[in-house]
Image (tube, rainbow, N blue to C red):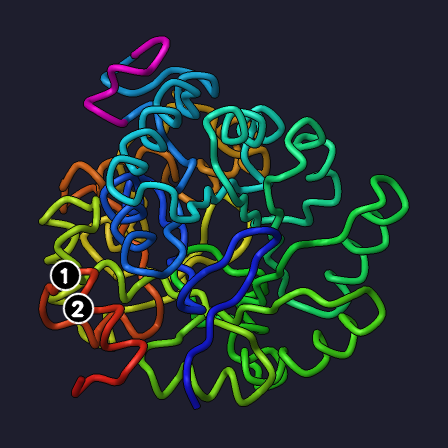
Amino acid sequence: MSLSSVKIGKYLIKYPIIQGGMGLGISWDNLAGSVSKAGGLGVISAVGTGYYEDKKHAKKIINNRPYETESFYSKEGLHAIIKNARKICGDAPLAVNALHASNDYPRMVRDACEGGIDIIITGAGLPTNMPEFTKDFPDVALVPIVSSAKALKIICKRWKQRYDRLPDAIVVEGPKSGGHQGFTYEQCLMEEFQLENLIKPVKEEMKNWGDFPLFAAGGIWDNRDIKIMLGLGANGVQMGTRFIGTHECDAHENFKQVILNATKDDIKLFNSPVGYPARGVKTNLIEAVAKKEGPPIKCISNCVAPCKRGREAREVGYCIADRLADAYLGEVQSGLFFTGSNGYLLKELISVEELIKKLVYGEDS
């Protein structure tokens, strides 16, 4: 089974591989631009763009962190990332991942459109209003992330009724992905919610709405896994963790080493201020939080609505924005290091071009 090109809206992706949007700062210009150049779809994370280029695009800094939502989700930072990614990939399709749970989500989507992005991918909630913020940019393709046929039905029904629009593609994400999950802790462990069991019912629901591609995500590792997903009816895949193991990944070298050094037992689900479990590496931070000895929680950046201005962060024991930022900055002791369930398989760093070749043709290519 060969890996065929796939269209998302008007954009042709040479290889049916979307690089997952990893924030804060893990997939920015260098990684996303390199993936698009190599024939996949590079995805820029819109999370924490106020940290880009040593925070020079943030409106205001307090305690060396972008202050308030406008600074944390910096428009100028996002535009700079898109511009620099374009220098790498040229006219190849390029995407932005914007979390629906983010404060100021509507502005983030418009900022991405104004920055010249081709495709917007949104998860972390049901983006039932997504087309409203892109109506002045009809060529921008819209890709919601769903975890069930029910979620897809809700999105398609509301998009059709309100905007006379349907998704240009969807990502179906199972509970083996890195970062926040679209499932409860118990559901993450149940067979019926595993990715391979989600594709069929979602495909059935898609028949009611139209012909757009489905990308499977969560725990996909190699060419064999990709072909399994294609055999189940997916048109392509989204992969995040595997791209951490590249030279071009925007993560700090310390971040990469945390993942490279992780064992299978180190990768855990843990509580998050967002309200759903998250998957990452059990590090000093997680152990300190368990002992109620985590870093101070000040809610400087006001990043996500479900956290309720730091209330949930105090319940859980850490600030998601600050701890992800520390990981991006290479602070091993206080950073939060997200990875998918297969992150322990990363053992070396290779180029994006070499990784794409392995994914398309097999590990021995």
Which residue is located at x 20 percent, y 46 percent? 251
The answer to whether any part of residue 44 appears in the image is: yes
* Amino acid type for the residue under numbered disc 1: Ser
Which amino acid lies under the numbered mark 2 shown in the image of this protein? Glu
**Residue 241: image x %, image y %?**
30, 63
Is 236 in front, or is 101? 236
7 lies left or right of 47: right
Residue 361 coordinates in the image, percent (x, y): 28, 82
Residue at the spot of label 2: 354
The answer to whether residue 134 is above or below residue 9 is above
The residue that appears at 54% across and 44% down in the rendered structure is: 120
Judged left or right of residue 18, residue 101 is right
Q: Is residue 190 above or below residue 72?
A: below
Whether residue 120 is in magenta: the answer is no
Total of numbered circles in the picture?
2
Residue carrying label 1 = 351
Mark pair 1, 2: CA separation: 5 Å
Residue 299 appears anywhere in the view: no
* Farthest-out residue, right: 161
Labels 1 & 2 near each other (Cβ < 8 A): yes
Give whichever of 75, 102 is nearer the camera: 75
For image coordinates 31% across by 80% down, the residue present is 222
The image position of residue 351, as x and y in percent, is 14, 61
Can you say whether 325 is above or below 22 in the image? above
Q: Give the percent coordinates (x, y) of residue 286.
A: 28, 53
Under tag 1, what secondary structure? loop
Q: Secondary structure at mark 2?
A: helix
Chain part drawn in magenta: 52-61
Is 78 left, or right, of 260 in this rendering?
right
